[in-house]
């Protein structure tokens, strides 16, 4: 009966499913004349700043207008009516928000000009979530950010986000959610993939949400990366070829093209990359570290009529990474007495592939009611393959995961309420193979173990924002979730928030309290694999979901186009997800730690374009990430010290400061300075004293120039001073990890019409 229920639920979701369009918000406003009387029949035009997309509306008898839905991004909005001077404002739309725009038109003079408001409406006033918005121009100018495997678009702009032991961490955790065109990409696996989810060159906007989520955004406590892809609305039968070359024989290349009409838009791209510097190395020298990959992306949007839009997105990629090793026999990592295992005899590789397909139907009943339906499919594979000659043990860990499902959501803006309700569900099937060949002279026979676990998740969400007054918004939501796999679990997660706008100052104060449930990976162990774990004094028990309790408060301060945002958060965790290996092997298993506590302060600053030339940004985090207690799932038979102790990715202070400036002759310069105070030190005194590894600073620089409308070039230098430091000494891919050496590369772009 349970399987019938899952199949029926999966069928229902597949044919009737997907998001409250989480790439969408809405805009409403009112227009008054100089005597503060409503202006009926005024023309209001909304235009995207990054594309040619536009739409219009006419004010009603109350002088009011509404645009719904509106995708995440930056817009200009203008108002015109006979007898009045035309007026314009800038507005930024974040997902699930509803900026309110007010125009007070002036009487037209003899020489009529457009009245442009001086302060852009960039601050969401109806959200408790701290948000970072990165646009396509930021990605193109930030040093190294447009490379296929780069995450600089996140780490340079988002406080508390950093890259260590080859994994992105944010707010002290691994698990994050990726959304493409508002559709969640399901992935319950932890730290098994090295390649990023998407090529940054295919992104129009990246919205990063850090906690305090409404119920529709799911349960990945640490971060949600909401991608608005390029769609073709920014093109008119135009193609672009990007080529690059640099040291370590690196190249990152892409060909894309797109166009649009009033009803149809398309965009497609193909990319390829390779480098002799793939992932972080266990020593300063770059040894056995090549990487290569290729992929593609496609987007189709069709406006059937004013009330119905169809959206199709697909992303495909395939990657290979050599696993670097320590070639020096006397290093601590090659000394198994200290709890490490020798990597000097390993020649391993990691093969990965990923495929995403989603379809969305967006139906607008009227300016206040919206339905979005999106089935999705996701395939993800990560194969860790050891050489048959590895010493002491050749290990193989191959995994593929297939997800099918979707999310259906309905949103309504009624009176003072902004209501979202919907259902999210998927079915998952994994195929896993674990193997070991013992080349250590122990005489242990080789083994292979095959596992085929499956599971499903279903979640309902309902969320409401109630505008008590123009300066106070209250938020409440609930997300009941049921997971079925090796274990069956249910959770009901309430969430509450509030935002308050300080009159005149326009400061936005916000507060939030909420609970989250993160479903566990399906990984399991039996037969010879379980026997192998037992010989290493380890056992395996089914993983249970992580449960998080978060409270957060913050303030956003706008001032003449500058925006300062500060927040404080505290996350209490039961069953904190992490990972560990079996003995002297590269078989990595997720584990859950009994408890965790992550707390910190964050600060961001973003300037307007100063003197129409320069813009600066800052992201700072002071954070403590701790865990403790028994291992409650996965590989067992060991415990952390009594009480809380620092996790391996705990870094107290992280700072990024950067900016770009327009120079003469259509050129620019862009830079970023990164400082980290140092991650946890697993081996104090060997050689670094204290509980933390040394602090480190890097400086990146990019210089670029446009040669006409078709051709542009840039020179990029990462870690200009070539400052090297051991980032962490935990055991993951390749053992210990050093930061990357200096990289320099040239990138050229050629655009043409077809």
Image: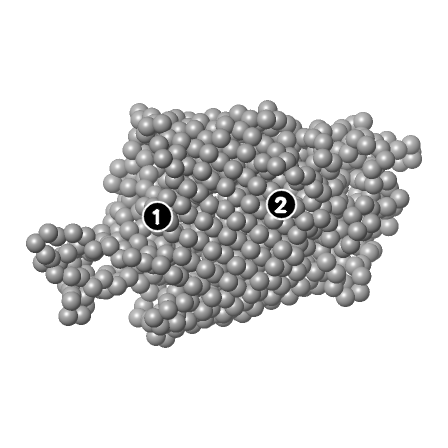
Q: Is residue 91 left or right of residue 483?
A: left
Looking at the image, which residue sits at the far right?
Answer: 442
Residue in the picture at 47% in, 28% down? 747
- As measured in the structure, the alpha-carbon distance from the residue carrying label 2 to the one carrying label 1 is 30 Å
Residue 157 drawn at (x, y percent): 51, 49
Q: How many labels does the image show?
A: 2
Q: Which of 70 and 503 is in front in this view?
A: 503
Locate residue 332: give its quadrant: top right
Q: In which quarter of the image is the C terminus?
A: top left
Q: Mark 2 points at which residue?
A: 697
Residue in the picture at 35% in, 59% down? 560
Q: Which colour scheme is used?
A: one colour
Looking at the image, which residue sits at the far bottom?
Answer: 468
Of circles 2 and 1, the one toward us is 1
Q: In this view, does 227 lie to the left or right of 292?
A: left
Residue in the picture at 67% in, 34% down? 350
Residue 657 drawn at (x, y percent): 52, 49
Q: Name the residue under label 1.
A: 611
The answer to whether residue 640 of the structure is visible from this angle is: yes
Q: Is mark 2 on a helix, strand or loop?
A: strand
Residue 159 drawn at (x, y percent): 55, 54
Q: In this view, does 585 lie to the left or right of 118?
A: right
> Vertical placement of 79 versus 261: above or below?
below
> Vertical placement of 502 versus 341: above or below?
below
Q: Residues within 10 Å of mark 1 (few under 14, many from 20)?
A: few
Which comes sooner in the sequence, label 2 or label 1?
1
Residue in the picture at 58% in, 57% down? 621
Looking at the image, which residue sits at the far left?
Answer: 110
Q: Quadrant of the N terminus?
A: bottom right
């Amino acid at each position: 009966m349970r399987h019938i229920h899952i199949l029926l639920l999966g069928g229902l979701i597949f044919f009737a499913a997907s998001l409250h369009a989480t790439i969408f918000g809405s805009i409403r406003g009112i227009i008054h004349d100089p005597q503060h009387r409503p202006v009926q029949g005024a023309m209001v035009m909304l235009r995207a700043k990054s594309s040619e997309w536009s739409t219009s509306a006419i004010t009603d008898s109350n002088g009011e207008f509404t645009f719904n839905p509106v995708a995440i991004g930056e817009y200009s909005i203008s108002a015109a009516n006979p007898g009045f001077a035309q007026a314009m404002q800038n507005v930024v739309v974040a997902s699930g928000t509803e900026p309110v725009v007010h125009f007070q038109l002036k009487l037209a003079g003899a020489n009529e000009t457009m009245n442009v408001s001086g302060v852009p409406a960039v601050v969401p006033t109806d959200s408790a979530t701290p948000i970072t918005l990165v646009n396509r121009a930021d990605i193109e100018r930030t040093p190294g950010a447009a490379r296929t495997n780069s995450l600089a678009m996140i780490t340079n702009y988002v406080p508390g986000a950093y890259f260590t032991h080859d994994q992105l961490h944010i707010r002290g955790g691994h698990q994050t959610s990726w959304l493409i065109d508002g559709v969640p990409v399901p992935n319950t696996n932890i730290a098994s993939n090295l390649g990023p989810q998407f090529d940054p060159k295919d992104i129009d906007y990246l919205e990063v949400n850090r906690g305090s989520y409404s119920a529709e955004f799911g349960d990945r406590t640490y971060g949600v990366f909401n991608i608005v892809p390029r769609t073709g609305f920014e093109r008119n039968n135009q193609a672009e070829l990007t080529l690059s070359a640099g040291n370590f024989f690196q190249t990152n290349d892409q060909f894309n093209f797109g166009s649009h009409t009033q009803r149809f838009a398309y965009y497609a791209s193909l990319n390829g990359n390779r480098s002799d510097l793939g992932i972080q190395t266990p020593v300063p020298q770059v040894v056995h570290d090549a990487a290569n990959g290729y992929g593609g992306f496609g987007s189709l949007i069709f406006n059937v009529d004013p009330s119905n839009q169809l959206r199709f997105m697909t992303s495909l990629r395939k990657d290979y990474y050599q696993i670097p090793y320590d070639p020096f026999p006397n290093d601590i990592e090659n000394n198994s007495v200290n709890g490490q295992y020798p990597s000097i005899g390993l020649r391993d590789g990691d093969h990965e592939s990923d495929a995403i397909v989603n379809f969305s139907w967006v139906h607008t009943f009227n300016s206040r009611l919206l339905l979005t339906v999106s089935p999705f499919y996701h395939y993800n594979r990560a194969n860790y393959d050891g050489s048959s000659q590895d010493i002491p043990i050749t290990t193989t860990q191959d995994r593929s995961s297939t997800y099918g499902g979707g999310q259906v959501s309905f949103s309504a803006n009624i009176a003072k309420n902004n209501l979202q309700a919907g259902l999210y569900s998927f079915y998952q099937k994994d195929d896993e193979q674990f193997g070991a060949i013992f080349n250590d002279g122990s005489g242990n026979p080789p083994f292979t173990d095959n596992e085929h676990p499956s599971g499903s998740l279903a979640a309902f969400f309902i969320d409401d924002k109630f505008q008590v007054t123009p300066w106070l918004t209250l938020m409440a939501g609930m997300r009941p979730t049921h997971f079925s796999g090796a274990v069956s679990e249910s959770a009901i997660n309430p969430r509450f928030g509030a935002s308050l706008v300080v009159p005149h100052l326009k400061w936005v104060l916000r507060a939030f309290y909420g609970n989250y449930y993160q479903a566990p990976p399906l990984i399991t162990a039996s037969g010879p694999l379980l026997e192998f774990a037992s010989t290493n004094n380890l056992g395996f028990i089914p993983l249970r979901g992580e449960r998080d309790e978060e409270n957060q408060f913050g303030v956003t301060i706008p001032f003449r186009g500058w925006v300062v945002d500060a927040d404080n958060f505290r996350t209490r965790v039961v069953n904190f997800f992490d990972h560990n290996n079996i003995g002297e092997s590269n078989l990595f298993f997720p584990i859950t730690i009994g408890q965790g506590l992550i707390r910190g302060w964050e600060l961001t600053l973003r300037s307007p374009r100063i003197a129409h030339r320069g813009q600066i940004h800052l992201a700072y985090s002071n954070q403590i990430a701790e865990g403790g207690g028994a291992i409650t799932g996965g590989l067992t038979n060991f415990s952390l010290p009594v009480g809380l102790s620092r996790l391996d990715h705990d870094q107290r202070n992280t700072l990024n400061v950067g900016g770009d400036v327009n120079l003469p002759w259509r050129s620019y310069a862009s830079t970023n300075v990164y400082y980290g105070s140092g991650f946890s030190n697993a081996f104090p005194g060997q050689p670094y004293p204290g509980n933390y590894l040394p602090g480190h600073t890097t400086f990146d620089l990019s210089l670029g120039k446009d040669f006409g409308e078709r051709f542009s070039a840039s020179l990029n230098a990462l870690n200009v001073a070539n400052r090297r430091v051991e980032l962490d000494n935990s055991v993951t891919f390749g053992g210990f990890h050093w930061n990357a050496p200096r990289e320099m590369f040239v990138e050229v772009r050629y655009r043409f019409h077809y």
